[in-house]
Image (tube, rainbow, N blue to C red):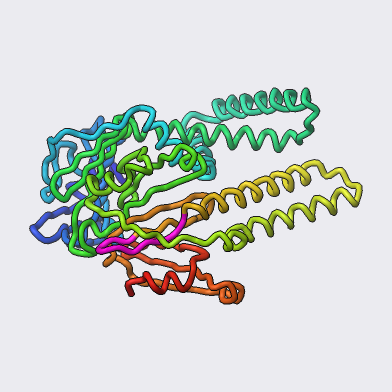
Amino acid sequence: MSFLFYFILRRLFVRLRFSEKEVSLEKGLFLKRFSVMPLCAVVRTTTRQTLTMRLFRAKEVSMFTLGGKIKFYLPRDERLPFLSEYKQAALKPRLGELMFGAFIDTRALGGIFVFTAVLRKFTAIFGSEYFNRLISVLTKTSEELEKALGFFSVTVPRVAVTLAVFVVGSWVFAYVRKLLRLSRFRVFRKGDMLFVKSGVITLYEHALVPNSTGGFYGAAAVRCETFTSILTNRAPLYLRGVMVLPCVRHRDLSKTLKVICGFKMPQNTISSPKRAFLGHIISPLSWFGVFAAALALIYSSGHSALLLKTVLYCGAIVELYAAALYLLYMCHSGIAFGAGYSAVSARRRLRLYTAVFPGDIIAFMIISQSLFQRRSGLCHIKLSLVERRKFTARQLNTDELERHTPF
């Protein structure tokens, strides 16, 4: 609907003006909305072309600042006046690197929501016949998997098997969707501007532009790590929420940051001491104890409760996995302050994020201690950046942190 109003009928509903200092956008016919965005505040522009837009020779443009964004449509061949042309040789990752980047970037929970939304839209357009066929395929797959588990004397409720098949199918759908989005991935660098192009069905073009806040880019280069990426010693690299490289080896991180972003990797990392291992895993271990106690109560009561047992077993396994993962992340987490640049490696849920950023974009820093940490001389440090990102390094030595913190 917005494409119809703001592109097909844009002469009636849209007034877009560019000047040397700002972009003015007016939308609506009776109820009008007026937006003004200073060009010095723009940190990223994203251009998107779906199949429908390509048929109409149109593109959707989103301009981002640290505080918000505006979105409008332009003809396909019209470029934004403040973005320069780029014709330099592009950096082209290999297919294996793209597959790895898509694998790390795909999340199971997000895949479930996306897959469910696509199913609902597909059903609304084509009717319930295809939806029923898909449900039939899922049911048959669940039955075959249940028979295979029965062959090995493993009894699992059918609803749990069906749910597992749906989750795996959703993840595969999300992975294929992410891989298509990363297809034809190209990175261009021109001066202080970075361009990223990708996509085969829907085309994407991101432009990361310098701005007047926070120094060069005023952003954090973030490396996202999981269990798989730590084992393979590779991980994708992001800037301004955009994947700029799908696969970066750890030993090449410092050189890559210097070439792509102009950042310098600080040394002398303050790491969590070995005696703090219990503080890293106490939360998942506590939940594991809750699940184990619930299972013991069910077995002692003599009730079958097969479905409930399956849920509790799954919860206990997940918490044990999380405890092992947190212990692994402990060996790779920490914080470092250098001349001009800082770095922090901090866990967030089941992922480890390593961020390198100019030191002058730190908005504020909070050091916290619990009663148990005071006795052991440990603390947490939370960094908040001007680009609304937060990282918490856990269980650090308080005395060492006070000696090296340049604040």
Q: At which x and y percent is residue 394?
A: 50, 63
Q: At which x and y percent is residue 122?
A: 48, 33
Residue 340 colored in magenta in the image: yes
Looking at the rendering, which quadrant does residue 52 occupy?
A: top left
Looking at the rendering, which quadrant does residue 143 occupy?
A: top right
Q: Depth check: give the residue in front, 140 or 130.
A: 140
Q: At which x and y percent is residue 260?
A: 24, 45
The answer to whether one can see residue 114 in this image is no
Residue 279 colored in magenta in the image: no
In the figure, 262 relative to 79: above or below? below
Instruction: Give the main secondary structure of the magenta stretch.
Output: strand
Span of residues in magenta? 333-342
Q: Quadrant of the C terminus?
A: bottom left
Which residue is painted at 11% across and 48% down in the image? 81
Which residue is painted at 70% across and 54% down in the image? 288
Q: At which x and y percent is residue 55?
A: 25, 30
Is 181 left, or right, of 352 in this rendering? left
Looking at the rendering, which quadrant does residue 31 occupy?
A: bottom left
